[in-house]
Image (cartoon, grey):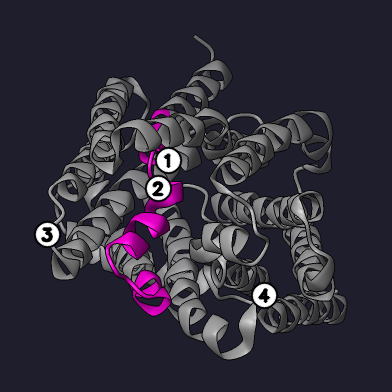
Amino acid sequence: MSQAKQKNDVVRDVTLVHFALMFGYRTFSLYYPLFLAAQGFTLTQIGQAYLFIYLPIALGAPLAGFLTRLIHPAFMAAAGCLGYAAYALGMFFFDGAGIVYLWQIALGLSAAFFFTASRALLMANPGANAERGFSWFYNAPYWAGVAAPAAGAVIIWKFGFATAFLISAAICVYAALLAAGMFGAPWRFSKSDSLFNNFISGWNNSIKIVFSKKIGIFILLSFIVALVESLVHPFFVLFLKDNIGLNQTQVLQFTAISAAVFSIFYFFILKRWQTGDPKTAIKRGGLVAGLATMAFGFLMPLLNYASVFLVEFARGVGGFLTGTGRSALLAKELKGRPSDAGALDTIFSPLSIALGSFAGGYLIQWLGYQWLFLVSGAVIVVAVFINMSLCKRGS
């Protein structure tokens, strides 16, 4: 088997595991805010619940990166999938807010293991085009989003959340089996002698590269885009229900159709934008995300099903471009350090989501959705133009 084909097989296998895991998780995750609201959680508490997922991902990523030097990432990804299954079972035995927060932390650590290990495998075996390779990985949740929310809605409607949690757990166990099957993927282990010292020195060098003038402004821009998206993301289902007036069936249609349309859009249009220059992808994605977010604010009085769909779709395109661009940029600049690159890439996205979801619960009550969209979108656009200006000065 040629080396190029072998690397493309790794991209395929990691993507399949990601799809299976997200299919299981998204059986209920889209409606999870509704579940929490039914348990008496306020908007602020829902935001805190997401903070307890994503902050542990960011904090757990360095540990996961360290462990990939000793343990094959396939087994770590499998352990992460089993953690998702345990979380779903934990929700089945729901027993108050305090227990929920503990399970959120456990889910965050499981996600840190899964995403760090998966990204490390992809960065060690990126395929012919790293940006497109990561696009397959990032597309997996969209493919899962076509059917999983629909199946979840039917299950929840007919049998309740408890059944959805059990089915989700079973699918996540299946994903763990698929992940364990990737053990044959090429991977280079670190030598056991002075492992910790090498880990510390390696991370110091990697962090210096990430925050260097060469790529630091692009990593920061991708972080800002993800942060702004996360201000509303945990509450988006509630936004559709309470502010746009969509009923349960329309919310289901919205999420399933948007995921399906995005996948088609990627293969026929968006894929052509990926020229192999991750810096351009980050800037282009940031501008699209910023303008679309501002459009939400300007169009708020006129929003309906169709207009919300189009604007949110554009926001999704912008976030997708910046996310794949950041991953490809880290893979390129940290070539030969897949453990560090996978951990660092796993830190930025969940950290922005943790901070954004936590702040969003307060900002929505203070500013309202309209002003939050206007202000946060303007922040992204300004950040993009500052990035462009700094690039011109450095050229």
Q: Observer-nearest residue: 312 or 84?
A: 312
Rendered view: 131 above or below 33: above
Snapshot quadrant of residue 127: top right
Snapshot quadrant of residue 22: top left
SS class of the residue under badge 3? loop
Q: Alpha-carbon neighbours of circle 3 within 10 Å: few (<14), some, or many (≥20)? A: few
Q: Alpha-carbon neighbours of circle 4 within 10 Å: few (<14), some, or many (≥20)? A: many
Q: Which residue is mark 3?
A: 95
Which residue is at a point 78% across and 35% down the rendered structure image?
265
- In contact (CB < 8 Å): disc 2 and disc 3: no
Q: Which residue is mark 1?
A: 26
Q: Alpha-carbon neighbours of circle 2 within 10 Å: few (<14), some, or many (≥20)? A: many
Mark positioned earlier in the residue sequence (2 or 4):
2
Q: Which mark is residue 217?
A: 4
| Relative horizontal placement of residue 335, taking residue 392 as reference (left or right) | left
SS class of the residue under badge 1? loop
- In contact (CB < 8 Å): disc 1 and disc 2: yes
